[in-house]
Image: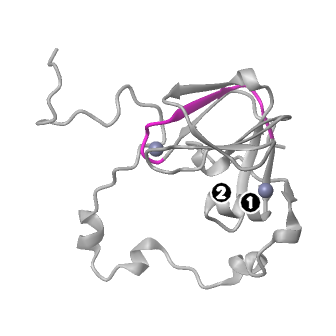
């Protein structure tokens, strides 16, 4: 599955770095190795490879890099910290959660399982609640203003607001 053609867009949480993949995505995976846990600050790294390097374009900004070994560097947004890439001599992979629509990029293989955290396989079974369940007052929930970039490309970011002076047309 997941050999989807077409245009795939995504970026970091703050919107300073945006990317586009024109063409096919490769194999989607999760990696449990200790380096991926650290790089993502997570239980594992969700990554999808880019079939051809030339298919990947940075459409706004560019990642900063940490060279995590002699062969691998990891790209991230230096403004907000979102992990974005895993780059090895044999190719580039992008963080699945950074895509504007991650819902169809389903992992098909797990790597580094010797590093798997012991509770990882049980998470679907732990108690689950919606965000609304977590808040006593829905008014408080309604008062929250998100500064996260939306899940689509934008002409300008951050958006121009009254008082944030920009030349009028
Ligand atoms: Zn960012
Ligand atoms: Zn790994």
Q: Which residues are magenta?
A: 13-26
Residue located 48% across and 74% down the image: 130
Q: Nearer the viewer, residue 74 or 2?
A: 74
Q: Is residue 166 left or right of residue 17?
A: left
Q: Is residue 87 magenta?
A: no
- The answer to whether the beta carbon of the residue marked 2 is less than 8 Å from any atom of ligand 2 is yes
Q: Nearer the viewer, residue 120 or 88?
A: 88
Q: Where is residue 31? Give x, y as percent.
A: 79, 58
Residues packed near mark 2 inside 10 Å, few (<14), some (14 to 19) or many (20 plus): many
The CA distance from mark 1 to mark 2 is 6 Å
Residue 167 lies in quadrant: top left
Residue located 63% across and 58% down the image: 40
Q: Where is residue 79? Give x, y as percent.
A: 43, 45
Residue 103 visible in the current orientation: no
Q: Label 1, secondary structure: give it.
A: helix
Residue located 53% across and 50% down the image: 82
Q: Which residue is mark 2?
A: 39
- The answer to whether the beta carbon of the residue marked 1 is less than 8 Å from any atom of ligand 2 is yes
Q: Nearer the viewer, residue 3 or 38?
A: 38
Q: Residue furthest left?
A: 163
Q: Is residue 163 left or right of residue 91?
A: left
In which quadrant of the rendered image does the N terminus lie?
A: top right
Q: Label 2, secondary structure: give it.
A: helix
Q: Where is residue 121? Give x, y as percent.
A: 78, 76
Residue 109 lies in quadrant: bottom right
Image height check: is 51 above or below 48?
above
Q: Where is residue 25? Give x, y as percent.
A: 76, 35
Image height check: is 125 above or below 167?
below
Image quarter for ligand 2: bottom right
Tag 1 and tag 2, C-beta contact below 8 Å: yes
Q: Which residue is mark 1?
A: 35
Residue 126 visible in the current orientation: yes
């Amino acid at each position: 599955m997941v050999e989807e053609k077409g245009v795939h867009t995504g970026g970091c949480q703050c919107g300073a770095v945006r990317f586009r993949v024109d063409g096919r995505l490769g194999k989607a995976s999760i990696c449990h190795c200790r380096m991926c846990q650290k790089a993502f600050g997570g239980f594992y790294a969700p990554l999808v490879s880019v079939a051809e390097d030339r298919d990947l374009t940075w459409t706004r900004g560019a990642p900063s890099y940490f060279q995590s070994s002699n062969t691998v560097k990891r790209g991230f947004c230096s403004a907000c910290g979102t992990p974005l890439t895993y780059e090895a001599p044999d190719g580039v992979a992008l963080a699945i959660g950074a895509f504007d629509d991650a819902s169809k990029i389903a992992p098909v293989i797990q790597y580094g399982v010797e590093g798997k955290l012991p509770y990882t396989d049980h998470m679907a079974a732990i108690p689950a609640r919606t965000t609304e369940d977590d808040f006593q007052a829905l008014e408080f929930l309604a008062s929250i203003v998100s500064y996260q970039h939306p899940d689509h490309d934008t002409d300008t970011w951050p958006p121009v607001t009254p008082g944030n002076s920009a030349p009028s047309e």
